[in-house]
Image: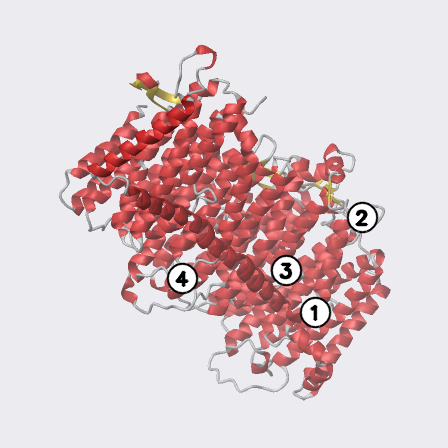
Amino acid sequence: MLLLALIPLLPLACFVVLGLFGKKYFSQSAGWLGTLVLATSAILSLYTAFNYFSDSGKDNGVYQAIVPVQLNWLPFTSDLSINLGILLDPISVMMLVVVTVVSLMVHIFSLGYMKGEERFATYYAFLSLFTFSMLGLVLSSNIFQIYIFWELVGVSSFLLIGFYFNKATAVAASKKAFIVTRFADFGFLIGILVLSYYSNTLDFKTLIERLSDPASAQSQAIGAASFLGASALTWALALVFMGGAGKSAMFPLHIWLPDAMEGPTPVSALIHAATMVVAGVYLVARLFPVFSTNESALMLIRYIGIFSAFFAAIIACTQTDIKRVLAYSTMSQIGYMMFALGLIPATDGHAAGFTASMFHLFTHAFFKSLLFLGAGAIIHYIHSNEMRDMGGLRKLMPVTHISFLIACLAIAGIWPFAGFFSKEEILHAAYQSDKPIYFIALITGGITAFYMFRLYFNIFWGHEQKHSHAHGEGPLSMKLPLILLAILSLVAGFIPFSHYVTADGRPVESHLDLLFSIAPLLIAVTGILLAGWLYKKANDKPARLAATLGGLYQSAYKKFYIDEIYLFLTKNILFNLVGRPAAWFDRHIVDGTMNWLASTTGKLSVRIKGLQSGQVQSYALYFFGGIAALGVIFIYLWK
Amino acid sequence: MNLHLLILLPLLTATAILFTRNLKQARTISLAGSILQLVLAFVLLAAYWQERATGNTAPMLFESSYAWFPALHINYHIGVDGISIAMILLTAFVVVAGVLVSWNVEKMSREFFFLLAFLALGAYGFFLSLDIFTMFFFLEISVIPKFLLIGIWGSGKKEYSAMKLALMLMGGSALVFVGLAGLYFNTSVNGGSYTFDLMQIAQLNIPVEVQKLFFPFAFLGFGIFTALFPFHTWVPDGHASAPTAASMFLAGISMKLGGYGALRVATFLMPDGAAAWSWVIILLATIAIIYGAFATMMQTDLKYINAYSSVSHVGFVLLGIGMLTHTAIVGAVLQMVSHGLMTALFFAAIGMIYGRTHTREVAQLGGLLKVMPFISTVFVIAGLSSLGLPGFSGFVAEMTVFMGSWQNPDPWYRLATILAIASIVVTAVYILRATGKAIMGPAMHSDHQLGDAAWNEKLAAALLIIGILAIGIAPFWLNDLVQPGVTLIMSKFQP
């Protein structure tokens, strides 16, 4: 079990060492140190996964949730206590592999990409911090533990987005990412409070046991308590989902993700494509047994998920910054994972959506990080994020070209690439449970294929730009991760995922229906052909199309003005209508009263100080006057 | 363990400083004295653990009592439980750090260090006292040095700020005294003698009506020390004008005197009063938290930012106390320690920045990370701790307060908790705005001669950061430490 604890602790140690001594002693070797440490973590993770899935995780053929390590960290009461522990179950083990493998690829890639950076050691320190936090998050055995690491991945993301700290846009993006997710976490935290209040535990296993069983006293209580027409359980789950939606960039909390692309590109690949942004999906999956008892919460997840998937796909069609296209595509793909989780399980209790969602999370991690690393290689090569600066790169960057193409095919859902299998399962689950959603998802698949190949043709085909580049495609450290991830994007789909990851731990056979696959495949191919027709050769068709679409195109290009709405709300409402008056009120009313009190006391004493003039005559006058007055009163009373 | 040492040592230090002739001697003695205090505080902690390990479950340990003014039943009675040890540790950390950042105070250095030592004396005495009159005595001792520190070594409109602070704190003291006198004159139940003794009063059944009458005096009085809305306005002005070390002492220690008093005296001795008035406490604390946070958002001066944010953060202490649940009160104590360390660190960082750039206006700062990486990192750490990032002490304290507050099932109290939680979003906004502009962002100081932290500043920052991390990463020891004390207080609430 020591080995297991080492998986997250090694990157932590690496962070501490590089953070304290990196600048002095590891300014060159930080990259190798970080990569080596992460390789060890990755090997340990693969070993753990192999062990878990082949043997140690199973009991009577059912995968168990095992908590091998737990440390009593902060006891609030005798029942409620934050325990830091490790929870092994199919999804956490699967995530362990995803996180370490993608992180390792990014570490290797960064050796070349970030070479010569002034804060090279700091960069690797932050990467290690992020990896540690993300591993802590997926391994959490306690709902408060997940919140702790939730915040830590948030701050690592903040530090890495703002890595180029002299750039004003990077700083603004890092702030935005942190604050938007913080706002979502506000909901998450209250959700935790409500859940823990009724279930009287913070431990995941116990909490799920108590709340997923409709007959237990705890779930009776949380179901009976209601507020504004919804049960406490619905509220709690919706609030927890709010936290997840913030991290996973679901509408309307998605606004930070496109801006987060200001960070170094390998960081985008790791954090904003493969790992941290799926934390929200993971959170819902973690609590899935509880979610699946509550149809209102499932409905919320389903609709937010499908809307985000569709909405982001539309925007992705119009963006010109390649990283932003990828960012919106990430949001769209996470939408798929999210709505799949929100599908109501079949009457026999089998949640096909759950398995499909996790499968898509798994495959998406590889092809999306591949897309981002490919984009990184391109940006490294031509020093621009803008699509119009690219074109005709297929001969100049053959490795990047082929790997990028594989990733595009995978995300478009073309057989036999990984995305085909996972998307297929999602569509299948949707078809059986919710037809309208199935159709929207189908169309979104076509749009996905279209915008991905719009990107592909614009970068690698079309008009060849003049590039005066002496250096080649990039060092081996940058090519190797591309190749490895391309292989993974090819083969990952063939893993019989439902044998390993299901909502209740019981392996099932998933059946691939050839007839069913025809529609999605046809739509995807149409999207690709359309993109090829429009963008393969430089022409004026795209511009004309944009002009024809007019306002629709403009709105999508402007991301449907969501940012502007937020800006209005924060600037005009929070700052001008709350903050400014509060500050003014404090200075002028509250403090004004205090000052008035002081100055009035002062004035009063000035007025009456004349009484003590030191003149014996006036004292005599007061004295006799007083006697006279007392005399009058005395006589009056006497009578 | 001889607790008198903790009072004697600052007194000796202060006296010795009077005989020094220059800055070098004064600061050396001051540092030596404060380090000894820190060592002593750790010895006390070890002694406490040892005593508890041997099964000593007495509520107060290492007690000793001497008659001081028998006619009025005033005793010099001292003793400690976990809560006071936590506060003493906090004081010791902040004192060492405060002395270190004042390493180069040229102006009247002897008097400066003398007053710092004297302030420490007041704080130690206050946390050790088990006689409420003695406690009051030490509370007063700690007010006057603040007045002088701000008035003489301050900046800006220092005379105004010093006067304001002294007057408002004196006003608070007056209210406290009314509360204490009210308690004293009702201690002679069943014909017994009058007493100022904390533990003896706790044994008595003070009539409910008396408690309801005098609780507000004591609570409000201590509340003014801890920036209770609407009596918090001495905080921003006081901090803005105070020299760095005085700011650190003021926010790190002084404001905690109020919180400790509100808990130890007002709440512990008048539980029925506390229960009757708790809704007012919650109301005022919630206002302080939310309104303080929004007011912070609009500040442009780094010191004002931290001062207003202190108003908001200390609101958590009062909120925790007002919730009257075990966990919330533990949270309140944790928050006192945590905020003390964190805000001292913040003021230290601000002082270092100001000492180099000669401005505290956020608009005039930019990209400091490039010019002074160490100081900037310290600032970021203080900021992240302030916005409650896990790993730092603020998270532990705030979460304990929230968790404890939620245990109170009253819907209005739940609303207050939700509002308090909402404030952490606003905190993130103002911390990141300041950080994003001053520390990150385009560099505005091309002058590389500004220089990074000197050894004394590094040491001060490191000390406070160690304290913050020790709580943030391993909160269980502090939690264990304060549990018995809170259990004692809560025992007064059990029917």
Q: Which residue is mark 2?
A: A350
Between marks 4 and 3, how big is the CA–CA gap? Answer: 29 Å
Q: Residue B480: x, y in percent? A: 48, 31
Q: Which residue is mark 1?
A: A313
Q: Quadrant of the N terminus of chain B?
A: top left
Q: Mark 1, mark 2: which one is toward the viewer? A: 1
Q: Mark 2, mark 3: which one is toward the viewer? A: 3
- Please, which chain is the residue tagged with disc 4 on? B
Q: Amino acid at mark 1?
A: Ala
Of mark 3 and mark 1, the one earlier in the sequence is 3
Q: Quadrant of the C terminus of chain B?
A: top right
Taking the spot 26% from the left edge, 50% from the top edge, the residue there is B153
The crowding category of the residue bearing disc 4, from other C-alpha atoms within 10 Å (few below 14, some 14 to 19, many at least 20), is many
Query: Do discs 3 and 1 share a chain?
Result: yes
The crowding category of the residue bearing disc 2, from other C-alpha atoms within 10 Å (few below 14, some 14 to 19, many at least 20), is some
Between marks 3 and 1, how big is the CA–CA gap? Answer: 16 Å
Residue A433 is left or right of residue B185, and the answer is: right
